[in-house]
Amino acid sequence: MSVDLIPYLYGPGGTPVSAGRGLALAGAVTADMPSMIDPATITFTDSPQTISVGGTYTGLKISAADGQNCVEVTTDDVVIFQDCIFEHSDGDAIYAPGGTVGGYGSTPQIEVYNCLFLGRHPVVVGATIERAIRYSSGSRLIVENSQFQRGRIQAYHHSADPAAVLRVRYNVALNIDGRQSDASGNPTTTDDIQQFFQMNGYKNMAGAFEIAWNEVWNEFGDSAMEDAINIYAAGGTASNLIRVHHNLISGAYPGDPAYFSYAGGGIMLSDGPGDPAYGLAEYNVVLASANYGMAITAGSAFEVRNNRVFRTGKRVDGATNAEHGDGPGIYVYDYGSTTAFGDHVMADNTVRWQEGSDPAATNNTWVAFPGTNFTDTGNTYPTSEIDQAFIDAEVLAFRDSAGAAGVTIGRTP
């Protein structure tokens, strides 16, 4: 391995830390994807319910029928879910619609700790696994140390109040799955757009916003994800950036292995209309997407700094990973959805994004119509070919850095 490819460790704020693998995931000292949990091993003891009173709800074990939500939150008070297990299909696990959504008129405040979300393909033709957490028009969403299988988190129109909080940290997400079902509940190769986390319509956020220290894993042929993290029509302020940092993303694939117009990837830091501004993605590790790694496509003053973005061009089993979207490792491109596009930064990233057809060839970055005052500086493009052993080393380095920073990622059973 060339010296310019040796992974480094980093802690909060990018401060280098000493080696010494911590238990970022319970007992994990390997580069393996965490194990999927079989719902058949769980005894579900509770029925779907509406929560109209704030408080802490501990140990719920709910499996909802097709079309049902596990829980619906209708109160403005803080509702905390601790050590719960939810199985859902084309309903949501936690449904917390604020404002006029759902007719509740509430402003939800939701906290989730050490919970397990199990998505199940519905026995409904054309239906997909819905959201693990659907949250809108609220002032508090905290999701930590939980595991998501096939489901996702979607947050709409979060409050711009300085006291508002949105944090998604220390979670594990496995095989985000937007594939539609057939009549028997088996996944087809037709899929809908889904992400691990999407925020939509959050402008001028003055409160705490952080997406950090999550691991998102997708397997080719058993998942269908657009972007792992998607920031859509949303932004912070000049003094309070949206922060997406220290996330590990491994794999992003379409549901149809033969689909060659796949648009998905790792972190879409700015997307959509409405002139969003002020976001920062730093110290993330993005690996093995079938299309792009990281992107800025809307708004102004978004920064991609100090990230590590790598693709071998092959899947874990050694087979060539067809480039379904032929995207670059990092790109900055004005799609024309906003009136102001500029002041973006791409700096100090390390990128080697190998082509599936020829690992010696790379598509590291693409910058087109970057707008005014674009900064492109300090980026490194290693010249030595990388392989799966290198990718594994990146995973271990990420987990080392979590352990050294005192971070535990994932759920404790």
Image: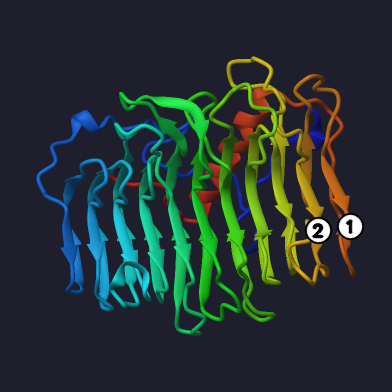
The answer to whether marks 2 and 1 mark residues whose Cβ atoms lie closer than 8 Å is: yes
Of the pair 298 and 192, the residue shown nearer to us: 192
For mark 2, what is the residue?
334
Q: CA distance from mark 2 to mark 1?
A: 6 Å
Rendered view: 215 above or below 407 = above
* Secondary structure under the numbered disc 2 in the rendered image: loop
Q: Which mark is residue 369?
A: 1
319 left or right of 228? right
Q: Is residue 378 among what the camera can see?
A: yes
Dot 2 crowding, Cα within 10 Å, few <14, some 14–19, many 20+:
many
**The image quarter in which residue 301 lies:** bottom right
340 left or right of 239? right
Q: What amino acid is labelled 1 in the image?
A: Phe
The residue at 41%/27% (across/down) is 187
Q: Position of residue 225 (x, y in %)?
A: 54, 39
Q: Position of residue 68 (x, y in %)?
A: 24, 49
Rendered view: 66 above or below 123 = below
Q: Position of residue 6 (x, y in %)?
A: 73, 36
